[in-house]
Image (spheres, helix red, strand yellow):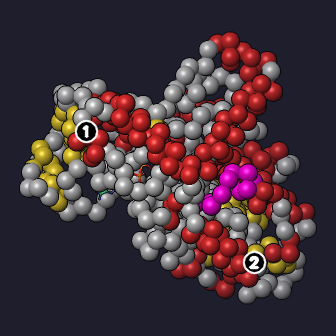
Amino acid sequence: MTAVLVVGAGFAGLGAAIRLRQAGIDDFVILERGTEVGGTWRDNTYPGAACDIPSLLYSYSFAPLPEWSRAYSGSAEILRYINHIVDRFELRPHIRFGADVTGLAFDEDTGAWTADTADGRVFTARTAIMAAGPLSNASFPELRGIDSYTGHKIHSARWDHDYDPAGQRVAVIGTGASAVQIIPELVGKASGVKVFQRTPGWVLPRLNHRHPAWLKAVFRRHPGVQDLARQAWFWGHEAVALGLVWDTVFTRGVETAARINLRRQVRDPWLRRQLTPDYRAGCKRMLMTSDYYPALQRENCKLITWPIATLCPDGIRTADGIEHHVDCIVFATGFDVCKTGTPFPITGLGGRKLHDEWSRGARAYKSVSVSGYPNLFLIFGPNSGPGHNSALLYMESQIDYAVRAVRLILDRDLRAFDVRQESQDSFNRNLQKRLARTTWNSGCRSWYLTEDGYNATMFPGFATQFARQMATLDLGDYHLDRRSTLAK
Ligand code: N01
């Protein structure tokens, strides 16, 4: 039986595989539903796709790259980095491509996880690491008449590279992190772009300087210098938490900076009003872009703020009765984020289903363990999302926690390593109390919250606090079972 099953070959799954290997555990299999590695960076190839966190920080500390071409890299360069770490750590032989997991089940007698895949394969292992990613399923909105539209439809996360927008009339629905990167690219090519905004975002400029050859040479020769630069970015982002995670005097500072940016970039007062948010900065994800506002003001671009009433065969009808005829609609409407339920059935002790237990919102212990699902570890699980720093830092802490637990299960030959329900409950009571005081719960709509306003996605604190939380594997919080006395 394999020691570890890893589900997903995106950043999280590959990071877990590298750390397993570095911990001396080579007996693992990575199940990947696609035909390439890269997860969200393989799928998000829309024009302008880039990361709004600096590459020196949006890369693993255990796999630094001196060659980043600029401060903030585009998706192609990030995907190259991902392929580079796959080759450097010789992960490819461990990956089973086209393995679309349809179910994970724990066998209480053997203490093993079994994964079934859509093509009929079955994989069994002592432990499992779920690294399927929260932003993997593209989401088309529930808009009236969506099927009646006869033109071209593209989702931002599944870009159609055969489509040429040159000379076309294009609509973009959504003004989130993806949309603000796509719109400037489309405005440069299409004959007309209409941007349908439901809620404006707070925008700060993104100064994307090139890394000159001498800097890359310094990073290559003196890795300590690159680490110092990474630390500088890290602490800069940590400081921003004071304004984005909680509603403080610094939040007013962030809003003032964003208002100044808006005033500097947008001359028309009416357009400025349409682009001014009415919620606290940080409640939704900050938008980091210097070319979105200029693109909106180009002759061939128009911002539409009337709500969409319905899609019709030729385009989009808004609530003011106007029909906007377009050749293509780009849905930059985000992802079907698993805040409730699970992406496929996960069956634990006594046949319990995680999908049912999470039907009103996902919850776990320290984001990685769920009571009743022994020997299973989640990467980027519930409440591990950052609003101000690199998601990879959070993943690293979770991965190291999971690898430590896997090592323990294998070394002590445990049949079950299961977090205690009371530890999980008390962890979540405290977490939700802390979340209630954050800007995410301050009254805006975002993908962080369920319909009922439950926050199952974000961690209410600094990255340093998250790292501290994950630094100890407290065995007192777990049932450890070597023989046949599983807690039911
Ligand atoms: O998706 P979103 P995204 N009618 O959910 C609108 C990561 N990311 O793909 O705000 C009309 O943020 C919706 O409107 P509203 C990052 O974590 C990272 O842009 O809900 N509009 C919103 O404007 C990010 O948070 C990078 O009122 C509708 C937009 O669609 C996450 O991905 C880059 C609608 C959806 O915005 C998701 O970003 C890109 C409807 N029915 C993305 N339904 C980095 O740089 C939805 N909308 C790392």
Q: Is residue 96 above or below residue 86?
A: below
Quadrant for the C terminus, please: bottom right
The image's mark for residue 423 is 2
- In percent of the image, x 62 and y 83: which residue is there? 351
Residue 199: x and y, percent? 33, 53
Rendered image quadrant of residue 124: bottom right
Judged from the image, the secondary structure of the residue bearing numbered disc 1 is: helix
Picture coordinates of residue 404 (x, y %)?
Answer: 83, 58
- How many discs mark residues in the rendered view? 2
Residue 280 seen in the current view: yes
The residue lying at 65 percent from left, 44 percent from top is 239
Cβ atoms at labels 1 and 2 below 8 Å apart: no
x 65%, y 22%: residue? 67
Query: Closest to the observer: 281 or 302?
Result: 281
Up the image or down, 484 lies above or below 206; here it is: below
Residue at image position (86%, 71%) is 475
Three-letter code for the amino acid on which mark 2 is drawn:
Ser
Q: Residues within 10 Å of mark 2 (few under 14, many from 20)?
A: some
Provide the residue designation for mark 1: 269
Nearer to us in this view, 389 or 241 = 241
Residue type indicated by callout 1: Pro
Q: Quadrant of residue 235?
A: top right
Q: Tell me if I can see residue 162 in this picture.
A: no
Q: Secondary structure at mark 2?
A: helix
Q: CA distance from mark 1 to mark 2?
A: 53 Å
Q: Is residue 290 a member of the stretch shown in magenta?
A: no
Q: Quadrant of residue 3?
A: bottom right
Q: Residue furthest front?
A: 249
- For marks 1 and 2, the one nearer the N-term is 1
Q: Does the magenta-highlighted stretch encompass residue 461?
A: yes
Read off the magenta span: 458-467
